[in-house]
Every structure is written in structure tokens, then in C-alpha cells.
Image (cartoon, grey):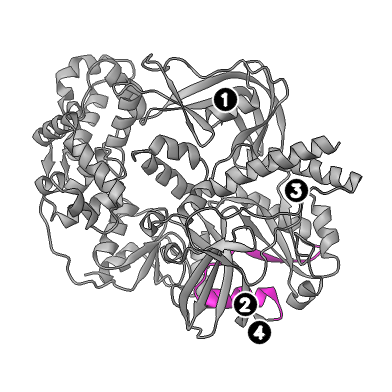
């Protein structure tokens, strides 16, 4: 029995080390919880607790080169349950607050004299890392507050699912994109890696948001109840974690309410937190060696379904990374039918001992993302492909910090080309409607497209296209019209479309602006000139220069310039009439092509665009001002004016 406990301690600590120190996931949260619960049961049965047991140790040991600092008081973990009845029993006859348990990185912000003076991560609960410069780039925190005393706010730094998808696509464009994407395979990992960067410019590109959940020191002592603290933090300009007042009587309904929201909730959450509303009562209960007694975590009861593994697909990406995807007999989970789950990398395939025909258990992580929880058969017959499934080139396996990934090294692999073309025609790039990935794949397979410029030479293949299955004269004409319209473009869009490592839409616009919209100036920028541009660091600059020094890329760009009509006109920025104002945009637009276009206009005039409504929001732009959307509701609650596009256009005349 002691040998089993030693094994569990070693296995759990290795998983925690990978997760917290290196932002890598070597086992699922569900598997970790299962082993952790087994260890707890063995400790209770034997009365033995080993020195390195994760049941008495919290957080990660700080090992990066960021400055370290002791917390004034320990930041303990929370005890947890998966039963609503346990929450009802725990709250008893008291009142509490039930809120999301956000899945990010806990950060403590300290304000002195109304100014953000320090930000420290939770670390191991005793010692954290100082990340003050990085915290100042969080999208929604106030760097100054209307309070002159010492105020210490605890909260969770997070990256939303929608931002994660966009950022992950951008990461895949970088020089180390394949390895980084394998590392940052979920928003929590990406957030932790972003918050703990040595360069705040990288943090600034990751759209990190902060949601406050408590006051730690200073003026927090003036309040008797948690809900008063929450209200005061909102008045200071913080966005707070959504919460609801609860008692034993309405606990089940409140938990059910949160459960209904989670499928469309954009912020990663791995459960709920219940805390006593009466602060003094909660403090009087004290704490154990690891857990405070004034709060408890509720973990979602994962719905597990057993099914049979039919296939493991190996899906090549534009960067050459080949991702494993498990295909299984369809099952109903959390109200939807699922038949696929990403297995992330070769290491997890091997750890699960996957084999075709194996009986596996599948769940939705945080009730959203399908994952394999357990392999009941464990035949282990699935191995990494020796050949790229698209081009047939010999694959290679990379081992980065213990995580194995499969790659196609062939620079001419059609999969890389398809993904490159898909990026090239995407909305924020050349914006060519009608050229879906499936259509591009057919055109590439038929030899009609091999380089970007070929997209504007499809007229050579008209007779063939109109006779292809699913096409006709109308489809051909629609594609031609879309290409013609997209051919009138800007240097910023072209730069974004080319897939230069690390260059996303925002950086492309900044670089074009710095070059006064002249393409010749853009492609001849030196590393020193690039790093002088706001938001461009050394790695990005070197990747940029290497891209434009490559002979094949030079030919691609030269051929594109022959078929494109670049609008290189440049206007000096006018009066910054929106300086100091923050906008949130929601709903459909009429005057602007899309939200990115509206955002660009606001930024040109000195304003800022945020993703969510807060006390700092100046205006919410919504053409349906009477809708019952969450953004409208929050704007009404905070007294934020809701204006239509028409009213916005009047404002900037």
C-alpha cells in the first residue's frame, strides 16, 4: 500500500510540475483528480502522509528568472467536492457567494496611492513571481484607481477561448510555432506562459484579462461582507468574477444556472467557488495546512461515456506539425453528439496506449472540450506515422521537454500549402470570399494553383472549373468577382496574408503605418528598423527579415505585386478625437465591413476597443440597443451609454 502511495505522490508531482512550471499537460485534469482522490483515500485509511504528498503541498516551486517575493499571507488551495449536496451541507444556515472558478493564473495586484505598484503570481502559495510590467498590459485592469490607501486585489488572469483560437493561429505562424502550439494547447497553459514572460511585449499580444475575486489587505478590512467587497472593487474599475448570493435552499438551482451557461461561456472555468458572505465568520474558522475553511470548490461532475476507438487521424498543419485526432463511435455528451477528440501529441497517444478497437471513456473537459479520460483496453497498437499522410515524406519526431510531437519536414508538402492558402485568403488577410479550404484543396490538387499569384490567374482554367462537380458558370464568376475585389488591397493586408512568422493583423498595420504605407519600404526594413516599431521584438524582426531574404519568397511577392493593385496612399493621423475613450462593439454592423474595420477607425482616432463592458467603458456600440444581450445588460447596470453606429458616425464627424 505504501508503494502505491509513493507511486501516486511521484506521478502527481510530475504532472503538477509539468503543468505549473512548464505549462505542459501530461495527463488530463480528470486523470489527475482520480489519482489525487485515490491518494487521499489511502492517506485516510493508513494514517500516513508522505513528505512530498500533493495533499499537503500547494502550487508550483518558482524556477524561472522572474524576481521572487513572499506573500504577506499564504495563498492556500481550496478543498473540493463534486456533489451539490456537499455544498448544501457545507453552507448550513449561513449565506454565501457562488462564483465561477476561472481556469487561469491567480495574480495579486497591489495599489499604492492609487497607482498599480506591484503584481505577483500565486506561485507555491508562499513565494510568487513579480510580473508587474506584464500585468500593466492586461487588457481590462485599471493601472490607476480612485483610492489613495494600500489596496491589494486578488484575481484570476485568463485568456478567453475565442482569443486563444486567434492567438494559437498566430503562434503557428511564428518560427517555433509547432512546438509552442503543442505546449500551449489550452487557454490556461497559454495564459500562464503569457503572464510569466520575461518580455511584457509578448504578454501584451496575448489579450490577457483579469477578473478580481477578493481583497487581500488594506481597505478590504472596512467591509463586513464579501458582496460589499465585490461592489467596491467594481466601483474602482475592476471586472469581477460573476457571482450569485446563495443559501442552502437555492444552492441546487444556482449550480444548475451556472451549468447551463458554461457551454457558451467564453472564459475557461473548471468549476465553481462557494465562500461565506460574512467575512469575519469565515476568518474565525481558520484553515488546515492546505485549505482555508471559509471557502470550497465545486468541480463539475464529468459525464463519462464509453465508446469504441475506430481510427486515429494524423492531421498535418501549415507549420508541419502533425496532430493526432481520435475518431470513435458517436456518443451523446452534455447534450451534443461527439465522435472526435484531439489527443494533442504523440506523448499522450503513447500514455493512453491507444489502439484501434479499444474501449475508451470520453468526457468533455470543463463540459466543453471532448477528451479521452481512460483507455479500458490499452492495446497500444497506434504508433506515429512513418510517412506524412499528405505528401508521403518521412516524418520526424521531436522531443521538447518530454513532450513528443510528429512533424513533416517537407517544405513542399501540399498540406502546408493548403493551410498557407487558407490563411492567405482569410478575412483578416486578403479576404477572398468563396475560396474555402475544400475549394483551394481541389484547385491545388488539379494543378491550377501552386503560388499565391495563381489565384488571380484562374481565368486560364475557366473551362475546367465550370465542368467540375459542384461548380458552374455562376460559381466561377463569383470567385472571379471576389478575387478582383480582393486584388485592390493595402500593404498591411498583403503583409498579414503572406504568413510572415509572428506577424498578425495588428503588427502588420503598425509596420505599414511606420513605413507610411509604402511596400518597398516595408520589405526592405532592417532588424534595427523593425525593433524600433512598437510591438516588434528581436525574434519577430529576425523572422521578418529571414522571410523577405528567402529567394522563393522574393519570387512569390514579386509575382503578387504584378497582379495586385496596392493602395499605398497614406494620411497623417488626424485629430485624436477619441483619445481616452474605450469602446465595446457587439451585434451586427451596417456601416462597417466588420468589427475589425470599426476597431481600426476607433484606434485611428485615438480610442481603444475592449472585448467586454466594464466601468472603464465609455460607450457600447450596438445597433440593437433594446436587446437582452449580456453586454447590454451589463452596460445598463453600470450606466454605460449604448449607442448605434449612426450615433457613433455622428460622434466622429
Q: Foreground mark, 3 or 4?
A: 3
- Marks 4 and 2, how far apart in space? 10 Å
Magenta stretch bounds = 224-249
**Quick check: 288 left or right of 563?**
right
Tell me the residue that label 1 is attached to: 326
Q: Residue at x 37, y 43 (%)?
A: 170
- Marks 1 and 4, how far apart in space? 54 Å
Q: Residue at x 33, y 26 (%)?
A: 416
Dot 4 falls on a residue whose secondary structure is helix
Tell me the residue that label 2 is attached to: 217
- Marks 3 and 2, how far apart in space? 30 Å
Dot 3 falls on a residue whose secondary structure is loop
**Residue 187 spot, x, y in % from top left:** 51, 47
Dot 2 falls on a residue whose secondary structure is strand
Mark 4, Cα crowd under 10 Å, few <14 / some 14-19 / many 20+, is few
Q: Along the polypeptide, which appears first: circle 3 or circle 1?
A: 3
Can see residue 366? no
**Where is 501 relative to 86, above or below?**
above
Tell me the residue that label 4 is attached to: 222
Q: Foreground mark, 3 or 1?
A: 3
Amino acid at each position: 500500500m505504501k508503494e502505491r502511495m509513493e507511486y501516486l505522490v511521484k506521478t502527481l508531482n510530475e504532472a503538477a510540475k509539468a503543468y505549473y512550471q512548464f505549462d505542459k499537460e501530461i495527463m488530463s485534469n480528470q486523470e489527475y483528480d482520480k489519482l489525487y482522490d485515490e491518494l487521499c483515500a489511502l492517506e485516510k485509511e493508513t494514517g500516513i502522509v508522505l513528505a512530498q504528498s500533493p495533499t499537503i503541498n500547494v502550487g508550483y516551486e518558482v524556477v524561472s528568472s522572474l524576481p521572487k517575493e513572499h506573500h504577506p499571507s499564504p495563498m492556500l488551495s481550496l478543498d473540493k467536492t463534486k456533489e451539490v449536496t456537499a455544498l448544501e451541507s457545507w453552507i448550513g444556515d449561513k449565506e454565501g457567494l457562488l462564483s465561477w472558478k476561472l481556469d487561469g493564473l491567480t495574480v495579486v495586484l497591489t495599489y499604492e496611492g492609487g497607482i498599480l505598484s506591484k503584481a505577483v503570481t500565486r506561485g507555491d502559495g508562499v513565494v510568487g513571481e513579480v510580473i508587474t510590467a506584464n500585468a500593466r498590459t492586461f487588457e481590462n485592469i485599471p493601472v490607476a484607481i480612485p483610492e489613495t490607501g494600500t489596496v491589494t486585489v486578488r484575481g484570476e488572469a485568463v485568456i478567453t477561448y475565442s482569443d486563444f483560437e486567434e492567438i494559437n493561429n498566430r503562434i503557428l505562424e511564428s518560427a517555433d510555432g509547432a512546438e509552442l502550439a503543442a505546449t500551449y494547447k489550452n487557454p490556461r497553459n497559454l495564459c500562464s506562459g503569457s503572464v510569466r514572460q520575461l518580455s511584457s511585449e509578448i504578454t501584451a499580444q496575448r489579450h490577457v484579462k483579469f477578473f478580481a475575486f477578493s481583497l487581500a489587505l488594506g481597505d478590504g478590512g472596512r467591509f463586513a461582507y464579501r458582496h460589499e467587497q465585490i461592489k467596491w472593487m467594481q466601483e474602482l474599475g475592476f471586472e469581477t468574477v460573476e457571482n450569485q448570493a446563495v443559501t442552502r435552499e437555492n444552492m441546487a438551482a444556482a449550480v444548475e444556472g451556472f451549468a447551463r451557461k458554461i457551454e457558451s461561456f467564453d472564459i475557461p472555468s473548471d468549476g465553481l467557488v462557494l465562500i461565506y458572505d460574512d467575512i469575519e465568520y469565515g476568518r474565525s474558522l481558520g484553515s488546515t495546512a492546505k485549505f482555508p475553511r471559509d471557502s470550497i470548490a465545486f468541480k463539475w461532475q464529468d459525464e463519462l461515456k464509453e465508446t469504441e476507438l475506430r481510427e486515429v487521424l494524423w492531421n498535418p498543419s501549415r507549420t508541419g506539425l502533425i496532430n493526432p485526432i481520435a475518431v470513435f463511435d458517436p456518443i451523446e455528451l452534455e447534450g451534443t453528439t461527439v465522435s472526435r477528440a484531439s489527443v494533442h501529441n504523440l506523448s499522450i497517444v503513447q500514455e493512453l496506449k491507444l489502439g484501434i478497437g479499444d474501449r475508451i471513456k470520453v468526457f468533455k473537459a470543463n463540459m466543453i472540450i471532448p477528451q479521452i479520460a481512460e483507455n479500458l483496453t490499452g492495446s497500444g497498437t497506434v504508433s506515429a506515422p512513418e510517412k506524412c499522410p499528405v505528401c508521403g515524406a518521412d516524418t520526424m519526431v521531436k522531443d521538447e521537454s518530454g513532450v513528443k510531437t510528429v512533424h513533416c519536414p517537407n517544405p513542399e508538402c501540399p498540406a502546408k500549402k493548403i493551410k498557407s492558402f487558407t490563411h492567405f485568403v482569410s478575412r483578416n488577410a486578403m479576404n477572398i470570399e468563396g475560396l474555402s479550404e475544400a475549394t483551394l484543396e481541389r484547385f491545388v490538387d488539379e494543378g491550377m494553383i501552386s503560388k499565391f499569384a495563381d489565384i488571380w490567374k484562374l481565368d486560364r482554367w475557366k473551362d475546367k472549373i465550370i465542368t467540375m462537380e459542384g461548380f458552374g458558370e455562376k460559381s466561377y464568376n463569383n470567385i472571379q468577382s471576389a478575387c478582383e475585389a480582393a486584388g485592390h488591397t493595402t500593404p498591411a493586408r498583403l503583409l498579414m496574408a503572406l504568413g510572415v512568422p509572428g506577424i498578425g493583423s495588428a503588427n502588420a498595420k503598425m509596420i505599414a503605418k511606420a513605413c507610411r504605407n509604402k511596400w518597398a519600404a516595408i520589405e526592405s526594413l532592417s532588424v534595427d528598423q523593425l525593433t524600433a516599431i512598437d510591438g516588434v521584438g528581436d525574434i519577430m524582426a529576425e523572422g521578418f527579415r529571414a522571410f523577405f531574404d528567402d529567394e522563393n519568397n522574393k519570387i512569390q511577392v514579386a509575382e503578387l505585386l504584378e497582379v495586385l493593385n496596392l493602395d499605398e496612399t497614406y494620411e497623417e493621423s488626424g485629430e485624436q478625437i477619441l483619445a481616452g475613450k474605450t469602446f465595446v462593439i457587439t451585434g451586427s454592423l451596417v456601416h462597417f465591413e466588420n468589427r475589425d474595420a470599426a476597431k481600426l477607425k476607433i484606434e485611428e482616432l485615438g480610442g481603444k476597443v475592449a472585448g467586454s463592458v466594464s466601468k472603464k467603458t465609455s460607450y457600447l456600440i450596438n445597433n440593437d440597443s433594446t436587446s437582452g444581450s449580456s453586454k447590454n445588460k451589463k452596460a445598463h447596470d453600470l450606466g454605460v451609454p449604448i449607442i448605434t453606429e449612426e450615433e457613433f458616425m455622428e460622434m466622429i464627424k
